[in-house]
């Protein structure tokens, strides 16, 4: 058990993708770099942000760390691939950082499992997808999906033309997106929540209670970081990280982590519409 619960951890990277640019003998794992928060944490200043890459042969099995030293770039080439075509590799990536003048690396939670599989007509994939769909529809809940606007009519209240974005995160016109309305209503989709990780975080204002459930879904559109999912009880979650498995073909199997919004968040005042299931 980790007793250092007050030590800040960085979330796993977003947009983890697996590809085979050199053919089947190697797999390339890439991800979006986690921005160095460049902030003072307890015990010092974050000096360096790196990553660890793990590999397993099933989504729920054991994952083993592949890199000897923390990976400094946002890519890892796995040359140690089995020649057996029935062996499927799953990957997870975590973010780790070092504090200036300290030797120890602080590793954050692992991402969801990511797989590479391109053939949609592959029987194995079809079976897995059908099974996942069954689980999702029978045990998931219908959430409303609102996607964050990155374009559209600019907010007249706070859009800053020089920086090209909203000037106030609490704006009640654009909710910090810089575009009128802030979010685009999409549809309802089944989301299956995983057990939440609850923790007490330390902010400059004091202690805060964090509720960050993991979740997964299958959707026709790619859910992105900072999109909103609203559960049947009206609780709004902001997507913190999302990773899409390439296996999905026209449907995306997506692993998410979410953050429950504070009840006082202005997004609870956002105008909402009735949405219907998309599947
Ligand atoms: Zn605004």
Image: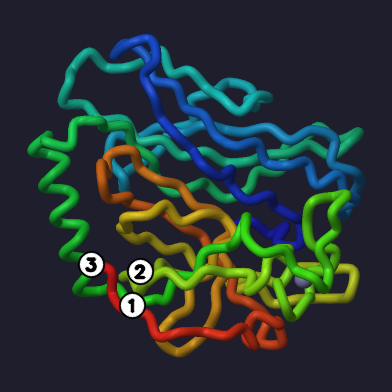
> To which residue does mark 2 refer?
191
Can you give x and y, in whole percent of width and height, for residue 31 in the image? 55, 34
Q: How crowded is mark 2: few (under 14 residues within 10 Å), some or many (20 or more)?
A: many
Toward the left, the furthest residue is 123
> To which residue does mark 1 refer?
142
Q: In this view, does 77 lie above or below 240?
A: above
Residue at image location 79% in from the left, 51% down from the top: 164
Q: Nearer the viewer, mark 3 or mark 1?
A: 3
Picture colour scheme: rainbow
Residue at image location 62% in from the left, 60% down from the top: 152
Indicate left or right for 224 with 104 as reference: left
Tell me which label, 3 or 1, sits earlier in the chain. 1
Q: Is mark 3 within 8 Å of ligand 1?
A: no
Can you give x and y, in whole percent of width and height, for residue 133 in the image? 20, 61
Say which of 4 and 206 sits in front.
206
Q: Quadrant of the C terminus?
A: bottom left
Q: Nearer the viewer, mark 2 or mark 3?
A: 3
Residues marked 1 and 2 touching at CB (< 8 Å):
yes
């Amino acid at each position: 058990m980790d007793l250092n619960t007050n030590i800040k951890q960085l979330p796993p990277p977003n947009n983890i993708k697996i590809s085979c640019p050199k053919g089947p003998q190697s797999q390339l794992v890439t991800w979006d770099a986690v921005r160095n928060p460049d902030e003072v944490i307890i015990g010092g200043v974050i000096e360096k942000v790196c990553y660890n890459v793990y590999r397993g042969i099933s989504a729920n099995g054991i994952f083993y760390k592949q890199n000897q030293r923390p990976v400094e770039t946002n890519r890892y080439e796995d040359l140690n691939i089995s020649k057996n075509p029935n062996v499927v590799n799953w990957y997870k990536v975590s973010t780790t950082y070092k504090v200036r003048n300290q030797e120890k690396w602080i590793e954050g939670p692992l991402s969801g499992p990511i797989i590479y599989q391109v053939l949609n007509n592959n029987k194995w994939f079809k079976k897995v997808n059908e099974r996942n769909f069954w689980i999702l529809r029978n045990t998931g809940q219908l959430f409303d999906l609102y996607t964050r606007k990155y374009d559209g009519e600019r907010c007249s209240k706070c859009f800053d033309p020089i920086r090209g974005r909203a000037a106030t995160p609490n704006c009640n016109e654009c909710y910090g997106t810089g575009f009128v309305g802030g979010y685009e209503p999409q549809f309802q989709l089944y989301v299956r929540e995983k057990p939440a990780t609850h923790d007490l975080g330390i902010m400059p204002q004091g202690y805060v209670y964090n509720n960050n459930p993991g979740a997964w879904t299958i959707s026709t559109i790619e859910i992105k970081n900072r999109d909103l999912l609203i559960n049947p009880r009206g609780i709004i979650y902001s997507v913190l990280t999302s990773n899409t498995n390439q296996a999905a073909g026209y449907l995306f199997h997506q692993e998410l982590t979410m953050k429950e919004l504070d009840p006082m968040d202005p997004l609870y005042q956002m105008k909402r519409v009735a949405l219907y299931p998309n599947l």
